[in-house]
Amino acid sequence: MKIFFKFLYSTLYPKRGTERNFMVSIIFIALFYINHTHSQNLNLQNFSISDGLPTTTINDIDQDEIGYLWVATDKGYSKFDGVNFTNYKQEEVNCLLIEKNKIYIGLKNGLLVLQNNKSTFFESKEILKIKSIHHKIILATVQGVCELKEDYIQPLEIHPQIDFSIINDIISYKNTVYIASIKGLWNLDKLYKPLKVEKLIEENTTFLLINNNQLTVATATKGLKIIDDHTIVKNVPSLENISSIKKRNDEIWIASQKNGIDVLEANTYIFKRKINKYNTAISSQINTVFKDNQNSIWIGSSNKGLYKYSSEVVVIKPKVFIEKIAVNYKLIDSLNVTKLALKSHENNISFSYKTINLKTPKNTEYRYQLNNDFTPWSHQNQVDFANLKAGNYQFIVQSKEGSLLSKKVTFSFFIETPMYQKAWFIILCIALLCLLLALFIELHIRKLNKKNQQKIDTLKVANHLLTLEQKALQLQMNPHFIFNVLNGIKALGNSGNSKELNKTISQFSILLRSVLNNSRLEEISLHDEIETLKNYLELEQKMNSKSFKYTIQTSLNNIDSEEILIPPMLLQPFIENCIKHAFQPNTSDAKIKLLIEVKNSFLHFTIEDNGIGYHQSKKEKVKSNHQSVALEVTKERIQHLSKYNSFSIEEIKEQNEIKGTKIGFKIPLKTDY
């Protein structure tokens, strides 16, 4: 500023008066230039790292449908809403393309595609430019031209000098395709298996632009070349190191990496003005220029960050967009459905909505409604609805900027009625309940019938057992045995042997008393049963014509025989059967052995004799027409005592010679403690 005022002083007071008028004119020109430069700077805004950018090197700029500005940098890419930068860390991003709600990001090692809050990466050579040609995504890479397929990137075979060359730009115009590469400008009739490949320019070509139905080509060192009908019709000197060419209204903006921006008249290519560090506060190292939907110019530099240049005030009606919808806190994939159908448990819904105004980003307000009246205006751009009931819903959101209102945006969704509230489910539940009730009644009736039948069966068994016990009592004292005992007592009386007579009468009376007493009881002690057997056996020894010996052995595991309970009259029929049928009248060494043991909670009985054997005795019974009713009754009693009982009769054999019979059975061990 001091230098300027010195210059102004020397101009106002020159040494030679003849030069005064000329100097005054120069001063007015300088003041006008300063004022023009100052007015330009008033419309210029710079964004750098302190404003949220990850770096000051900007490679490309684009804008999506909502209005977000997407910025490619050497440290990833950023999304700008006019107030805040949202940065996504990544390697250097060379270029951007936004097409049909998809964002294509060109990287050094491939392509990143963003859609519906999801990202997909495709590996490839370094991508320098992304273009949409004939509804296909075409990539200009450092090694030829590629096409993005559904799940991979396909290199295109065009021409040997193109396939392995660095491709700077691609454009489709007038049913032909132009490819700008470091080996020149090529013209093709089509990208896929072209029939005609023509080289129009030999030198390195960097950028292509359609202007006034002509193709504008930027070269690396020889300015611009205007092509019409495959012919160069004009050469336009321009900046060197051109980094981008963009058309803005009736102007062409040419950005350079060394000398700022030249602005040309679009129809004549006549120079209009220059924008650089000498006449504005902008950097001279410019990588890209972009015009947004409000006619603001965004300039990306390689060392000073991002510039916003607004020379015109364009008023546009705001648009509101629903950005995200989350169901139960999980983002849904697509927002393009006409009506979203949700299950009954999916009743927590969140909406995020946005209106982007890069000129006045803080003036936007919103209101919404859900089947009811609109809410008051606020700056809040997100709302959560929790625990919504089943039914149809219509979410409506609107934004405003000052007095300008956006169109209302509507999103409809339906929450399914829970199954337990549906009519068919209620009817089914009632039917099932009735069925279950009927089944319960049926089962209860069956249970009662089964219980009654069990009682009847138990009574039958008890009655049968009682009958068996009565039969056993009736058969316990065989009439023949009583007759023999009485005859024996009579003989002893006639012989005058009073001592033996008294003993026999005493034993017989004890036997009769025990039989009568035991018949009244369901169970007696093992000790009483053994004593009764001893009396019976001793009387049989005295009165029977067959002479025999007997032994009674016990192995009770230290349990007192008086504490063990058994049914009465259980053993006597087997002993009587041995005495009557096991021995021949002339047998001299007849023996009966009774063994009682406790094993594994069971009481085991074994009765052995050394008689003629079981089968031979059965034959003798057939000859004599004798039926051992008492034995059969006792066997049946044993079978009814427990399901775990076992009964066996087997012959004792030694060297194929019958040595007697062995009877064995067991009953559950029962004690009185």
Image (cartoon, helix red, strand yellow):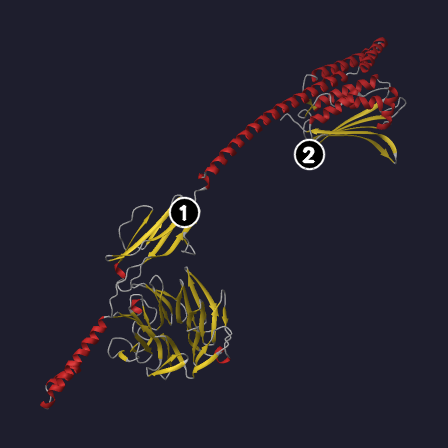
- Residue hosting label 1: 414
Classify 338 as above or below 105. Answer: above
Residue 305 seen in the figure = no
> Which quadrant of the view contains residue 248?
bottom left
Q: Position of residue 312 (x, y in %)?
A: 25, 69
Residue in the foreground of this view, choosing between 516 and 631:
631
The amino acid beneath tag 2 is Asn
Q: Residue furthest left?
A: 17
Q: Position of residue 530 (x, y in %)?
A: 73, 23
As helix, strand or loop, the secondary structure at mark 1 comes to strand
| Label placed on residue 79 | none
Q: Is residue 184 left or right of residue 539?
A: left
Residue at position x 38%, y 50% in the image: 412
Of the numbered discs 1 and 2, the one sitting upstream in the chain is 1
| Label placed on residue 600 | 2
Q: Is residue 662 left or right of residue 314?
A: right
Q: Residue furthest right?
A: 586
Classify 622 as above or below 3. Answer: above
As helix, strand or loop, the secondary structure at mark 2 comes to loop
The amino acid beneath tag 1 is Phe
Residue in the foreground of this view, choosing between 304 and 137:
137
